[in-house]
Image (spheres, grey):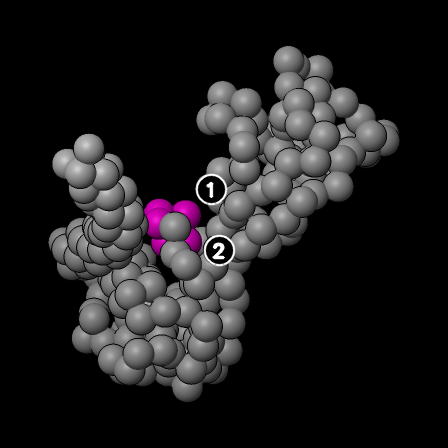
């Protein structure tokens, strides 16, 4: 597989290849393969985005406050962007200082939305955004996504639940590998800074 898929059909065809099916030219070509891939494409994409803090999908927002307060202990309500699939953290707030609600009422009508609730007046939110342009997906995400999509379509197209389970497990391994690499990169930079600081303290102490 190339580093990046160019179209949705490209990556759907990779998933189809995992289950021994022919590629497609478009998700709208009318074939059973294309229809099945199209049905699951968006939900699988969002699921894989939620599973890991993919750098290509990282975004920041300082959302506008809703005038209607929350009835709970966290009063301020902030509707999040429509492309938000998961909140990673809120800058300077602990995990118990913010929550998510599934909808908000900006008047008399109920509107489905993800809403951040907290007591901060201007929260800065780091979130995972929905990236629909597959040419922006990184290679690891493409690999994991293709396996997860293949797992979804294996039963209806290949009539194999065992293959679906195997592909799903392989997708989990790919996501886990991305998480471990990310953790090592962060740990490496942290250790480097800490070691330098400790070394400087040791040298200064030795010279006293």
Label 1 close to label 2 by CB (< 8 Å)? yes
Q: Is residue 122 left or right of residue 109?
A: left
Region rendered in magenta: 48-52
- The quadrant holding residue 103 is top right
Could one spot residue 148 in this view of the protein? yes
Q: Which residue is mark 1?
A: 88
Q: Position of residue 118 (x, y in %)?
A: 63, 25
Q: Residue at x 53, y 45 (%)?
A: 126
Q: Is residue 87 magenta?
A: no
Q: Which residue is mark 2?
A: 58
Q: Secondary structure at mark 1?
A: strand
Q: Nearer the viewer, residue 33 or 90?
A: 90
Which residue is farthest right? 107
For label 2, the SS is strand
Foreground of the two, 64 or 9: 64
Left or right: residue 153 compared with residue 177: right
């Amino acid at each position: 597989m190339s580093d990046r898929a160019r179209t949705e059909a490209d990556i759907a065809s990779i998933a189809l290849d995992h289950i021994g099916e022919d590629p497609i030219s478009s998700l709208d070509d009318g074939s059973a393969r294309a229809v099945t891939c199209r049905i699951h494409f968006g939900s699988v994409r969002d699921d894989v985005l939620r599973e890991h803090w993919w750098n290509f999908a990282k975004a920041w927002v300082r959302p506008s406050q809703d005038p209607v307060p929350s009835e709970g202990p966290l009063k301020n309500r902030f509707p999040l962007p429509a492309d938000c699939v998961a909140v990673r953290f809120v800058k300077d707030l602990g995990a118990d200082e913010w929550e998510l609600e599934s909808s908000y009422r900006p008047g008399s009508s109920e509107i489905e939305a993800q809403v951040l609730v907290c007591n901060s007046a201007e929260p800065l939110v780091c979130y995972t955004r929905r990236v629909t342009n597959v040419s922006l997906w990184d290679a690891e995400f493409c690999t994991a996504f293709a396996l997860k999509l293949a797992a979804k379509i294996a039963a209806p197209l290949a009539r194999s639940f065992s293959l679906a389970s195997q592909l799903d497990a392989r997708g989990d391994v790919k996501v886990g590998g991305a998480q471990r690499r990310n953790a090592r990169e962060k740990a490496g930079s942290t250790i480097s800074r800490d070691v330098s600081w400790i070394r400087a303290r040791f040298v200064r102490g030795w010279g006293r």
